[in-house]
Image (spheres, coloured by chain):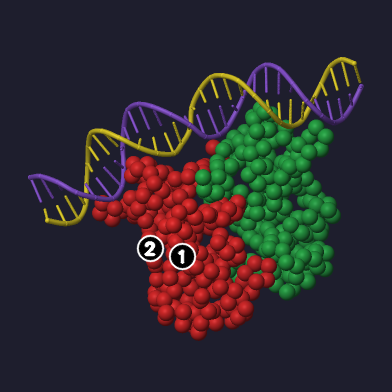
Chain colours: A red, B green, C purple, D yellow
Amino acid sequence: MSPLAETAGLLADPTRAAFCQALLDGRAWTAGELARHADVRPSTASEQLSRLVKGGLLAEERQGRHRYVRLAGPEAAALIEALASYAPGVPRPRNLRQSVRLGAEARARTCYDHLAGRLGVALADAVITRGLVADDCGLAVTPAGRAWLTEALGYQHPAGTRRPLVRSCLDWTERRPHLAGALGAALCATALERQWVRRVGSGRAVKVTPEGGEAFRELLGVEVG
Amino acid sequence: MSPLAETAGLLADPTRAAFCQALLDGRAWTAGELARHADVRPSTASEQLSRLVKGGLLAEERQGRHRYVRLAGPEAAALIEALASYAPGVPRPRNLRQSVRLGAEARARTCYDHLAGRLGVALADAVITRGLVADDCGLAVTPAGRAWLTEALGYQHPAGTRRPLVRSCLDWTERRPHLAGALGAALCATALERQWVRRVGSGRAVKVTPEGGEAFRELLGVEVG
DNA sequence: GGCACGGTTCGGGCTGGGCCGAACCGTTCC
DNA sequence: GGAACGGTTCGGCCCAGCCCGAACCGTGCC
């Protein structure tokens, strides 16, 4: 069997796809959480997770009686994003709870290891208008941006990695790109660490704290609505 | 069904995957050619092609009693590449004919609309060492490269397109990146047009002509073995 | 020790879908 | 017109694989 079909097959099942999309929040989930999320029995989840792990898309870690899984790495996340955004269909809320959840996620959420939603797109726009990132046929960090990355975010890019310093990732609510790659990850990590944003609920949504509003305004001139 | 699983499902079948990988050469194939290539009956090929077209991965064009299909666009090609190269398995020749074919493809071939194989990787190295493209955490065309693109290749980048000017594409024989994106496409188009390379056989392999050897040496200092 | 709980394994039911052959349709060539 | 050919449609076969329930195992808590 061709490797293409094999890898695609891993993502061709609604249950496994739901797992992977949940894991796009970049965190580690337990098998039970994922089973409830995808609405299948634990036995089913266990089997499908094993497949995804064996296929190299997920990494697992056992702790006591829990099995934690997360995406294997940025390449896996990029692959899932690319597939999911190929045929863009905007998700429509089917009930009140889902509508609330989608609303929160549309405002601000994590996407693997970076920020997305209106917040993520606003940040991307800001770094471009401030000349930290050039949108010159594909994103690229400018010299000024490199300095900003070190000074404002305290980020040092390790030499010799293959991960791009900045990468554009299509936002499925905004239909516009936000920041991924090492820069996007650093920004998200800093924001979580310094409590500029806080996780809300169990999903991917985050909320901008008052300090965060201040910080984004000061750092990048972004007014968070 | 989630859009992710749906798109992945299109590529999760060996026959459809074989079609897509054949079409990665960037040309249009007839339904019959693809059927023979994938070793299935015409009826099967017809059905599967219809699915791929309906799913938006392939575009079709009817001419007389022929049905020509090709990849829908660079996004589709990038998606297939990404999926195929996620689990890297080097193809092993199974018989003499295949061995010859793989040898020719390893030397030089097309990959969707750009050049790959040892030739492709050599060209990528050349434009980087000549300062036409910067390999600075992701590829980027330098000002010098932009001038070269206009003067040597006569290429004018249309404003407002979302396609990156240059993009790196992992070579599955060399395991190193070659040039994709608009630059890679322009280089490949020029090479075919000016007969620097010629198609050999029915697959993706190309052969560098004597004039091509000269041109690559003169243009980029590349010595084609 | 006993119990609750998260996770896994196994057997079995069911369905989707991949494939083929046969019949059919339109084009091209003689 | 007739024959050859590329492609499509349809009916039917068959298997992969998705899911569940039941039984089981190890951990952690009382």
What chain does badge 1 belong to?
Answer: A
Element class at badge 2: loop
List the residue tagged with mark 1.
A104
- Badge 1: few (under 14), some or many (20 or more) residues near its Cα, within 10 Å? some
Front residue of this view, candidates B182 and B75: B75
Q: Which residue occupies 61% across, 76% down?
A: A128
Disc 2 to disc 1, C-alpha distance: 10 Å
| Amino acid bearing label 2 | Gly
At x 65% / y 46%, what residue is drawn? B56
Q: Are marks 2 and 1 in contact (CB under 8 Å)?
A: yes
Q: Residue at x 43, y 70 (%)?
A: A207
Chain identity of mark 2: A
The kind of residue on which mark 1 rests is Ala
Quarter of the image where one finds residue B9? top right
SS type, badge 1 = helix
Q: Residue at coordinates 39% horizontally, 46% vertically from top-left?
A: A39
Residue B134 location (% of width, % of height): 65, 70
Query: In the rendered image of this protein, does residue B162 appear above or below residue B199?
Result: below
- Read off the residue under disc 2: A201
Q: Residue furthest bottom?
A: A218
On whether disc 2 and disc 1 are found on a single subunit, the reply is yes
Where's residue C4, x and y in %? Answer: 19, 49
Residue A18 in sight? yes
Q: Is residue C16 left or right of residue A47?
A: right
